Amino acid sequence: MERILVIDDDVELCHLVGEYLHAEGFTVECVHEGESGLKKATAGEYLLAVLDVMLPGINGFEVLRRIRATSRLPVLLLTARGEDVDRIVGLEIGADDYLPKPFNPRELVARIRAILRRTRADGNGAPSAPEIVRVGDVELDPATRAVRLDGQPVDLTSVEFNLLEVLLREAGRVVPRERLVNAVLSRKFSPFDRSIDMHVSKVRKKLGDTDNDEHIKTIRGVGYIFVRPREKSKTT
């Protein structure tokens, strides 16, 4: 069974979530404060962590920040409904997705499965390793899920890696936001959901993009484009 860590101080909620996820084929362990949750999350024993923002001791943001300092463990962040700031901050720190409270348990399972699908490496006996993708000074290796910029490693979360891969494979062509949401976040597009934009912003920062030198350009009202070197030089 697949092991999920739930870090939430609501004991009753943890019990209900644990029962529901167990029925869906997951093994669930719950902890109720940040310090203990952090220790377990970084122990390398879980496929994913469900992390509440509001925790006693160190809050969920700080737990997530410390997880990201040493681990790529997928994290689904639980936020208060309507708290857009929580969602934005969580995505900036490195959450793979978020889910507002209260939530439907079926949606929780759907989000967890979507995250796991996109974070697992393709190690299912594929006949050959996927080819390395190179565009300009950026190199992406799907087999090892490694990214390099001018030969130097770039540390990306699983969502950021998948986002960059889609854009690199379509380099020189505009990729609509709706397609990115479907492909990268595995959910239907909503014009009010800015999650994909936050992930693009994080990738840009990690690639060193500036106003005068961009790898990823915004096509207002449509989506994003990874600029090929020749097209890049024309715009500077």
Image: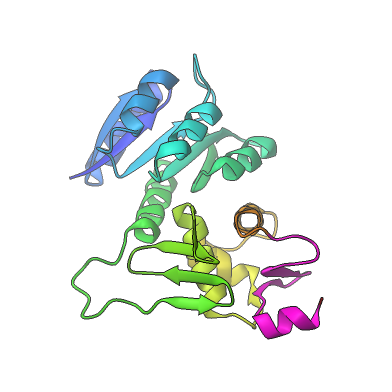
Q: Position of residue 132 (x, y in %)?
A: 41, 76
Q: Position of residue 168 (x, y in %)?
A: 54, 75
Asked if the magenta segment contains residue 24, the reply would be no
Q: Nearer the viewer, residue 184 or 105?
A: 184
Residue drawn where x is 66% and y is 69% of the image:
215
Residue that lies at the very extreme toward the front in this rendered image: 151
- From the viewer's perspective, is residue 133 above or below residue 14? below
Determine the image quadrant of residue 121.
bottom left
Q: In the image, is 215 to the left or to the right of 108?
A: right
Q: In the image, is 46 to the left or to the right of 232?
A: left
Determine the image quadrant of residue 39.
top left
Identify the image's colour scheme: rainbow, by chain, secondary structure or one colour.
rainbow
Q: What is the quadrant of the C terminus in the image? A: bottom right
Residue drawn where x is 56% and y is 80% of the image:
170
Q: Position of residue 133 (x, y in %)?
A: 46, 77
Asked if the magenta segment contains residue 233, the reply would be yes
Residue drawn where x is 73% and y is 78% of the image:
232
Q: Nearer the viewer, residue 161 or 29?
A: 161
- Give the extent of the magenta segment: 209-235
Q: Position of residue 1 (x, y in %)?
A: 17, 45
- From the viewer's perspective, is residue 125 above or below residue 91? below
- From the viewer's perspective, is residue 18 above or below residue 192? above
Q: How many marks?
A: 0
| Residue 186 can be seen, yes or no | no
| Residue 147 can be seen, yes or no | yes
Q: Nearer the viewer, residue 193 or 149?
A: 149
Residue drawn where x is 24% and y is 65% of the image:
123
Residue that lies at the very extreme toward the top in this rendered image: 57
